[in-house]
Amino acid sequence: MNVIVILCDTLRRDHCGAYTGGKPLNQCWSEEAPEWSVPTPNMERLAQRGTVFENCWCGSTPCMPARRDIHTGRLEFLERGWGPLEEGDADLPRQVSGPPNTSITAIREQGRSVSYLVSDHFHLWEQGSGNYHMGYSGFQFIRGIESDGLYTDPIEPGRDFTCPESAARGKCERHWRNMHFDRHEEADWTCARTFRTAADWLRRNRDHQDFFLHIDCFPPHEPLDPPEEILKLFWPDGYGNPEDNADNWPYAKWAEAGLTERQMNFTRARYAANVVLVDRWLGHLLDTMDDLDLWKETLVIFTTDHGTYNGDHGRVGKLQTHNHDAVAHIPFIACHPKYGHGERRSQLVQLVDIYPMVLAATGSRFPAAPLHGIDLLPVIQDPGAPTRDYAVAGMFGGSMTITDGRWVLHQPPGPDNQPLNWYGYHLARFIPYPLGDFADGCRPVGNHQSYMSGPLWLSDRQADPNELRNMAASHPGEVARLQEALRHELQRLEAPPEQLLRLDLSRRETSDPHASCCPA
């Protein structure tokens, strides 16, 4: 069958009507949340046509590590951080379509399928990760968002802009410049252009058998600049009050970052409006599928790479601390042509599961290397089919999260966060790490004090779905159970053994605390 994978970056689960039933946000996780509802009728259309997975957890964070999970079917964060695909990776589009630069005629003659990428996600092309497009039969990059250096033209007199004096200034200025030249109506936003381009591709390419279309939409990821007409659904003043504007979307505790409560709420409104924008143009794609009658022969997977803090835990933006529910617990909806329509599943699933799902659905070859992902097609067909007992997530060099779906443990690294090794020959560019010399397949990471951590943390999602209370001290038995489970999971996943040491999970009496594949 055909497969369409739709990934919308930084999409909170509680902003998807398929998961909230349209309830106001302050009834979803805390009274601190806004009282508005976020209308997402097209995400709900997918839920009616498909299977809603209620227990999906991301895996590797943030943006590009999550994509490498999808492209390889293996958890990246166990071995390295943000980086490009490497030569040994059996990346997903090449498994579908064969070697790059193969003609469409040859792809068909080899019994393979056409793959295509449509994306406005600049990171896919940016130094430090910019080769994720190369395995597809074809691709289209929708330009103009965030730090994409599209325009350099002088700005006409009388036009001005403000950006924070920070590392984000370059991104802010380039994005503002792109907006100035490219946006005149809602259809000009990159989100709209991405879904329109994908819909046009479907109209022209519907006759390909078992095609794989990958749509990677950067919004609702910041910059939070939705059309004012949508913003007014949540913030009647629109952009009219300059005092509402914060400098940026800080990854920090919002009060410590200098945001007023009104600015924090304005930020929430802009994020909600970005979600509505995404949903509107998702609807354009779904309408095209209706017109072409593609549902009877197409598997559609809708998800995100991770969520974000939006006032919960006193924070805004991702990273900073543990991967709590707001970041790690994500939407995942799969629409099969025959099975699971309007149904829900409680099994634990992760983004690495997309890889075997796409290969199985398109009849493509599986790689020889073992996968961390699980084909979910049997789960869609059979509500009782098993997946995994635990999901594991994290950011390279940071804390690790393990959950059985109810209890969640966030295990921080030890005080020195050592030993830690970066596996692979590429350097850490986008998110820098202090790397040593390459030897024996990896580089030692020195003096990396993870900022994405916090105290040992235990949550009971049944009583506290947004993980606002730390129950580690009152439930030592659950902590010990999940720590033992994490030990076993890391071994099962063939994680580098030193990960147990840096997390203080190794049985020190039988392990060398200085074990490392890399020279000191």
Image (cartoon, helix red, strand yellow):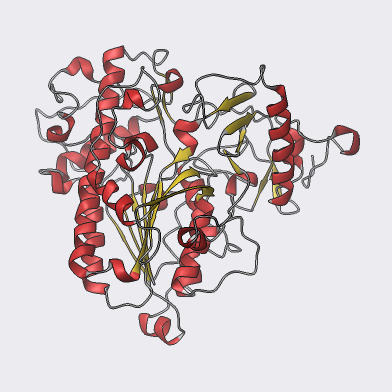
Query: In the image, is 18 to the left or to the right of 136?
Result: left
- Residue 272 in the image: above or below residue 304: above
Q: Residue at x 77, y 35 (%)?
A: 501
- Percent from the top left, x then y, of residue 197? 23, 60
Q: In which quadrant will I find the C terminus?
A: top right
Query: In the image, is 269 to the left or to the right of 388?
Result: left
Q: Residue at x 62, y 44 (%)?
A: 390
Most distant residue in the right direction: 509
Q: Nearer the viewer, residue 307 or 299?
A: 299
- Percent from the top left, x then y, of residue 202? 25, 68
- Percent from the top left, x then y, of residue 347? 53, 48
Q: In which quadrant will I find the N terminus?
A: bottom left
> For residue 203, what is the image quadrant?
bottom left
- Percent from the top left, x then y, of residue 229? 12, 34
**Residue 416 visible in the shown view:** no
Q: Residue at x 75, y 30 (%)?
A: 504
- Residue 265 in the image: above or below residue 198: above
**Residue 156 visible in the shown view:** yes
